[in-house]
């Protein structure tokens, strides 16, 4: 009779995302393929129907994530955070990127799991994001030796309120080692397979991100996520642009290769000047509430809020002259405060996310000493995920099963 492996795990919400978190020690006995099989099974992927009904995933990219956490032996580093983006419909775990939202759950996990000594009222957890080689400090509220989840801080896209976690990213630019503008220019024209061209800005802060004007691709930057997902031609075009940028950056050799194997990075977002729109829960966002509008696409679906990593790239791009993001933020219809002030307010489908970014010119490129965001997090469940041993050998991981 087949048996199930019982693997300790914690199910968390971090920002507007959810993930299954594992201790590195609990996955150390598995090779890379077996590790991915464990994660796919835990989340319920692959599911050709897009529901992840047989796991903990929620059927969209922001709810289909995992991470491996380990104590660090490096200087000035407490924790190492290895992030996994799990494809909903295909048996693919992409380790190439990182996640700003799930980053907010790493500090509380480390404290509650005894990996970091708690200090009241706030514990600083120094984290290395293994995927990108970048570091951040999580400032986590602590009471009674445990991370606090309850509080009065509200983030758009999460019902209710929670304890505010400050995430301070130190020198978050240039994960590819080529600067804020990895191709050396603020704007460039990408050639598409159809023979047409489109103007993009590629910015590498936290994660390489491709920005395109919504007007250039026929997209509506005030639209809901559901409406944008229903526009299949728009989604196809945005994925082609994203894959073209991956090839331009040398991450993959072809569009097909990028589409099949480089799903989580680079990210892509449409941007536009501020405008009135209605959020998914019926709130009205006025032009003066934002510095620009943005809609991010993750794993070929519109993000229901806005990725934390992409928010950092957006906030920096809004302060770099020449980028399409800068143009949107400097529009005459922009809000009362300028994006050049350091804080950038990004309008997304669920509301507004403010990001503080320090940006300085550095010769022909730019330097980003720090970016700060504010999130909340909550431990939802702790226990074990059950994984049939047969899954370690690939059984049940065929997307057509």
Image (spheres, helix red, strand yellow):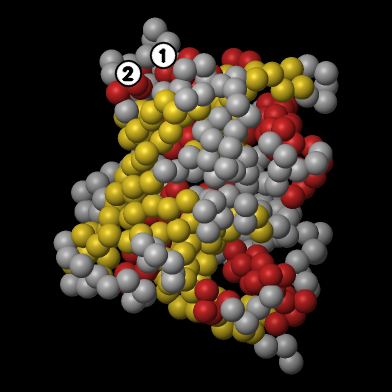
Q: Which residue is mark 1?
A: 330
Q: Residue at x 27, y 65 (%)?
A: 147
In the figure, residue 46 lies in which quadrant? bottom right
Does residue 95 appear in the picture of this structure?
yes
Give the x, y percent position of residue 305. 46, 39
Quarter of the picture containing the N terminus is bottom right
Query: Residue 338 shows which numbered tag?
Result: 2
Cβ atoms at labels 1 and 2 below 8 Å apart: yes
Q: Is residue 240 left or right of residue 9?
A: right
Q: Position of residue 120 (x, y in %)?
A: 17, 65
Q: Position of residue 101 (x, y in %)?
A: 43, 49
Q: Secondary structure at mark 2?
A: loop
Q: Pick out the residue farthest to the bottom.
A: 1
User: Residue 389: x percent and y percent?
Assistant: 70, 82
- Element type at mark 1: loop
Q: Is residue 235 left or right of residue 380?
A: right
Q: Earlier in the sequence, mark 1 or mark 2?
A: 1
* Mark 1 burial class by Cα count in 10 Å: few <14, some 14-19, many 20+: many
Q: Is residue 76 above or below residue 167?
A: below
């Amino acid at each position: 009779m087949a048996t199930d492996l019982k693997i300790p795990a914690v199910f968390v919400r971090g920002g507007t995302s959810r993930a299954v978190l594992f201790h590195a020690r609990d996955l150390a006995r598995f090779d890379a393929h077996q590790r991915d099989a464990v994660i796919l099974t835990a989340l319920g992927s692959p599911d050709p129907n897009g529901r992840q009904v047989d796991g903990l995933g929620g059927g969209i990219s922001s709810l289909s994530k995992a991470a491996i956490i380990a104590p660090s032996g490096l200087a000035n580093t407490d924790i190492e955070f290895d992030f996994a983006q799990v494809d909903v419909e295909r048996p693919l775990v992409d380790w190439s990127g990182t996640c700003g939202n799930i980053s907010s759950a790493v500090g509380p996990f480390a404290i509650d799991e005894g990996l970091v000594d708690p200090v009241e009222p706030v514990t600083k957890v120094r984290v290395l994001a293994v995927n990108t080689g970048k570091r951040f400090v999580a400032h986590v509220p602590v009471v009674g030796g445990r991370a606090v989840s309850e509080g009065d801080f509200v983030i758009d896209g999460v019902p209710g309120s929670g304890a505010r976690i400050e995430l301070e990213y130190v020198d978050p630019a240039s994960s590819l080692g080529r600067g804020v503008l990895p191709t050396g220019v603020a704007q460039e024209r990408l050639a598409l397979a159809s023979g047409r061209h489109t103007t993009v800005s590629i910015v590498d802060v936290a994660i390489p991100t491709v920005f395109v004007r919504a007007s250039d691709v026929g997209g509506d930057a005030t639209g809901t996520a559901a409406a944008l997902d229903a526009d299949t031609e728009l989604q196809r075009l945005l994925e082609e642009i994203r894959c073209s940028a991956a090839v331009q950056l040398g991450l993959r050799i072809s569009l097909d290769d990028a589409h099949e194997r480089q799903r989580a990075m680079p990210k892509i977002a449409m941007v536009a000047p501020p405008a009135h729109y209605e959020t998914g829960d019926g709130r009205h966002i006025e032009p003066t509430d934002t510095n620009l509008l943005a809609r991010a696409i993750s794993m070929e679906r519109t993000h229901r809020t806005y990725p934390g990593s992409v928010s950092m790239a957006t906030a920096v791009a809004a302060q770099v002259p020449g980028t399409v993001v800068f143009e949107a933020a400097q529009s005459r219809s922009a809000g009362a405060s300028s994006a050049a002030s350091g804080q950038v307010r990004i309008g997304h489908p669920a509301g507004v996310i403010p990001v503080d970014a320090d940006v300085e010119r550095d010769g022909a490129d730019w330097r980003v000493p720090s970016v700060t965001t504010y999130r909340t997090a909550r431990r939802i469940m702790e226990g074990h995920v059950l994984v049939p041993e047969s899954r370690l050998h690939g059984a049940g991981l065929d997307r057509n099963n």
